Image (cartoon, rainbow, N blue to C red):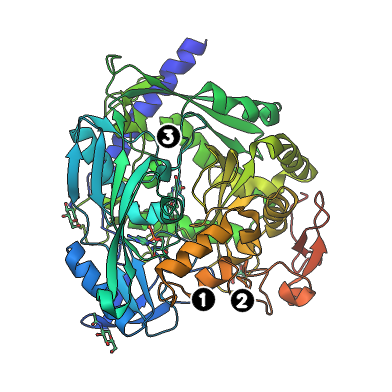
Amino acid sequence: MAVMQGQAGATRVAVSLVLLLLASLTGGSPPPEPVSCARGTSDCTVTSTYGSFPDRAVCRAANATFPRTEKELVAAVAAAAASRRKVKVATSHSHSFPKLACPGGRDGTIISTERLNRTVRVDAARRLLTVESGMLLRDLVRAAADAGLALPHSPYWYGLTVGGLLATGAHGSSLWGKGSAVHEYVVALRIVTPAPASQGFAVVRELVAGDPDLDAAKVSLGVLGVISQVTFELQPQFKRSVTFVTRDDKDMAEKLSVWGGLHEFGDVSWLPRQGKAIYREDDRVDVSTPGNGLNNYIGFRAQPTLGLLTARKAEERLEENGTDVARCLAARLPAATFELQAYGFTNDGFFFTGYPVVGFQHRIQASGTCINGADDGLLSACTWDSRVRGPFFYQSGFSVAMPKVPAFVADMQRLRDLNPRAFCGMDAKMGVLMRYVRASSAYLGKAEDSLDFDVTYYRSYDEGTPRKHADVFDELEQMALRKYGALPHWGKNRNFAFDGVIARYPAAARFLEVKDRYDPDGIFSSEWSDQVLGIRGSPNVVGPGCAIEGLCVCSDDLHCAPEQGYFCRPGKVYTDARVCALERRRTRLVDEL
Ligand SMILES: Cc1cc2nc3c(=O)[nH]c(=O)nc-3n(C[C@H](O)[C@H](O)[C@H](O)COP(=O)(O)OP(=O)(O)OC[C@H]3O[C@@H](n4cnc5c(N)ncnc54)[C@H](O)[C@@H]3O)c2cc1C
Ligand SMILES: *[C@@H]1O[C@H](CO)[C@@H](O)[C@H](O)[C@H]1NC(C)=O
Ligand SMILES: *[C@@H]1O[C@H](CO)[C@@H](O)[C@H](O)[C@H]1NC(C)=O
Ligand SMILES: *[C@@H]1O[C@H](CO)[C@@H](O)[C@H](O)[C@H]1NC(C)=O
């Protein structure tokens, strides 16, 4: 029986894969530049790849430079430092959700690392690879493989740059060895910082293993200066063996405590409404193990623009006028489709014939083919391309220390059990992705071994429009951050998540000491970095509707949308939470039918 189902499944998989491959043959469109200037390289704006920061504003800068060499980079920093102008690094796509890419004020300078993307040095014998900071993770992974080496852990999306992913502490999933954060594999870097006039206003500082400043520079939010080059200590090439197993979620809380110990690259995705957990059994195997598997994650492939438009329209209709039943029905489709198509894994680069998928690390660790295609005139694009009115979403990511994970997960499940249908919005976006991250010596890295929770969810294009069941999402985040002391991912989340967070970093003072030494005038600091680092102001933007937008935690009905029936109320499981809850029904819904 199981075999027959397996065969039928495989046939369906093969057929749909062929269709998908055909679809992706049309190419793709490189994402838009985050920096755009009205006149040459002056009068510029900077935004993220989603075209919108949490406060929906666009940042301004007087001008932008695009250095090609370290020498040009030093000149750019010196020019800014000499005139004490604010300055900030933007990368080729700028994927961070918060306002990290904005220089302070409105007349700062943007330094783009887009053209700093070369391999500087390969030392295969010592397994060292030195690259420029604007290099994409995609190209880093390839350069390592070309030298017979492997970066053991990385984020799953390869459109990020080395400088950007380090600055925000980006990671994959592992509790083994040094863990999953890319910065754990940095053994040296060169960073350009402001300097006194006597030194020409800018200097290159070379930090090597053992230098305590490296623990500041490895995860820096970009406030110390511009990282020019990074040296990674890699491992010999290896292969991985990947299997996804879907089970019910009854023992998930206990399983999560041991899963990271059982599998070097293990992670777990939770579909709360469906009560399912998808366990990724992912282990290192010898390079001689047969298999040339490929991870081409479906969610990171180019999608036909028309499909993106249609999908968004349908999503908006459901969000605005649908019932819970209709929303929940629609929410089953993505996970079912992805499971059927093995999430985009194939055994040979073309077809999925069954688990395990065995393949080289560089073909498994990360993906992102939507940035690769030749320009097809926007016939297809990455799902989140801001030029297409397609899916628009928030992404929250926070890490809970391992000892607290079982209690947090039990609380999440309690909240789910109160009204499972409220969680369909999570199922619709592939649920909650849970990944392991080890404690770090980096001052702004994780203080303890942790489990990182990632949730993607609907965002309205219209400011102030409440989301359905936003109260459970908000309660969950407040519970993680406040009751369980979770740390928000620096490159994800909405404003309120960062309120008071710096107090949870035991080495924050040491970080700020390095910042004062490297950049005493704070030209690399912005309003946002000052707010999250606890230097000046609060990341919260308090005003009418702020809790609807995630810019504050409500303390007054006005922070919600009382005119639409949303009032500030306590959480249901974590009663210290304050969330915008729908109390008066504006229209007669037919949920109960
Ligand atoms: C589809 C997708 C998947 C993702 N998957 C993961 C994942 O699996 N794991 C994970 O941890 N995160 C993930 N992320 C989040 C991601 O790690 C962060 O958003 C990351 O910071 C973005 O990198 P970037 O190169 O776009 O940097 P940006 O967002 O452009 O920059 C981030 C910060 O770094 C600074 N900076 C950049 N380069 C330099 C430099 N050379 N010197 C000094 N400062 C610099 C910038 O000024 C800015 O302050 C994902 C994001 C997306 C969109
Ligand atoms: C940016 O503009 C400022 C002010 O006009 C100017 O001093 C500076 O030289 C400009 N920098 C670049 C790189 O154009
Ligand atoms: C650097 O970026 C350019 C432009 O995007 C690209 O053509 C080139 O292949 C990249 N170089 C490397 C080494 O990745
Ligand atoms: C929801 O219904 C209203 C009233 O019928 C309509 O005006 C609106 O366009 C609908 N919204 C969507 C997204 O279809």
Inter-mark Cα distance, 1 to 3: 40 Å
Q: Is residue 163 left or right of residue 317?
A: left
Q: Position of residue 224 (x, y in %)?
A: 41, 65
At label 3, the amino acid type is: Tyr
Contact flag, marks 1 and 3 (Cβ < 8 Å): no
Q: Nearer the viewer, residue 562 or 282?
A: 282
Q: Position of residue 557 (x, y in %)?
A: 78, 74
The amino acid sitting under disc 2 is Gly
**Can you tell which quarter of the image residue 564 is in?**
bottom right
Identify which residue is drawn at 36% across, 82% down. 85
179 to 591, vertically: above or below: above
* Residue topped by disc 1: 527
- Label disc, if present, on residue 343 of the rendered structure: 3
CB-based contact (under 8 Å), mark 3 and mark 2: no
Tell me which numbered mark, 1 or 3, is placed earlier along the sequence: 3
Q: Is mark 3 within 8 Å of ligand 1?
A: no
Secondary structure found at label 3: helix
**Residue 537, numbered circle:** 2
Closer to the N terminus: mark 1 or mark 2? Answer: 1
Camera-nearest label, 3 or 2:
2
Disc 1 vs disc 2: Cβ atoms closer than 8 Å?
yes
| 424 vs 502: above or below | above
Residue 383's spot in the image, x, y percent?
A: 39, 54
Q: Amino acid at mark 1?
A: Glu
Q: Which residue appears at 66% of the width and 68% of the height?
A: 548
**433 and 88: which one is in front?**
88
In the image, residue 393 lies at what x, y percent?
51, 58
| Label 3 to label 2: alpha-carbon separation | 43 Å
